Image (cartoon, rainbow, N blue to C red):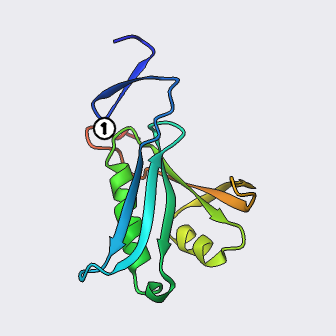
Amino acid sequence: MRDDDTFSGGRRYPRNVCIAWRQTWRIADLEETLIGAAETVFHPSPSKGWIALLIIQRGFQGRGYGREAATLLEDYLFSFPEVTELGLGVLVQNTPAQAFWEKRGYVHIAQRSNTHGNDCYVDRLPRSTPAKGECKNPE
């Protein structure tokens, strides 16, 4: 292994390569009714988990599906020990989504235009506990 290599998920990658594993998730109820969809990615590096999409059909909103899906997505992304924080983008005009993510502990760190030219907040959530195998620093 070279000094400029890093491991992720048992694979070796050069450090200057952006790993963008994209995972698409189907969100369904117990009867397999499609409720929504989600997408996660590791971007711009393996230490940054990104919730690229979480959408719940309007008729299913307000029933806890989004909250449960967000928890599962966060747990999935933080299950990778190298992930130190999560990020996502929220449209500036989408105040219900902003409130949803803020309740979960996400903080606005920037405002910029997305690839479609819409104004978005970029939000971050740091890992709150050490990953498996990591030790807490004594205070």
Q: Quadrant of the N terminus?
A: top left
Mark 1 Cα shell of 10 Å, populated few (<14), some (14-19), many (≥20): few
Q: Residue at x 69, y 60 (%)?
A: 120
Residue 68, position in %: x, y? 36, 73
120 relative to 99 in the view: left or right: right
Residue 95, position in %: x, y? 66, 76
Number of numbered tags placed on the structure image: 1
Q: Residue at x 47, y 86 (%)?
A: 62
Q: Which is more toward the observer, 48 or 27?
A: 27
Q: Residue at x 62, y 64 (%)?
A: 90
Residue at the disc numbered 1: 134
Relative to 57, is 87 above or below?
above
Q: Is residue 104 visible?
A: no
Residue 131, position in %: x, y? 32, 44
Where on the picture, by quarter, is residue 139? top left
Q: Secondary structure at mark 1?
A: loop
Q: Which is more toward the observer, 73 or 38?
A: 38
Q: Is residue 25 visible?
A: yes
Where on the picture, by quarter, is residue 65? bottom left
42 relative to 34 in the view: left or right: right
Relative to 67, is 112 above or below?
above
Residue 136, position in %: x, y? 34, 41
Relative to 127, is 107 above or below?
below
Q: Residue at x 37, y 50 (%)?
A: 78
Amino acid under disc 1: Glu
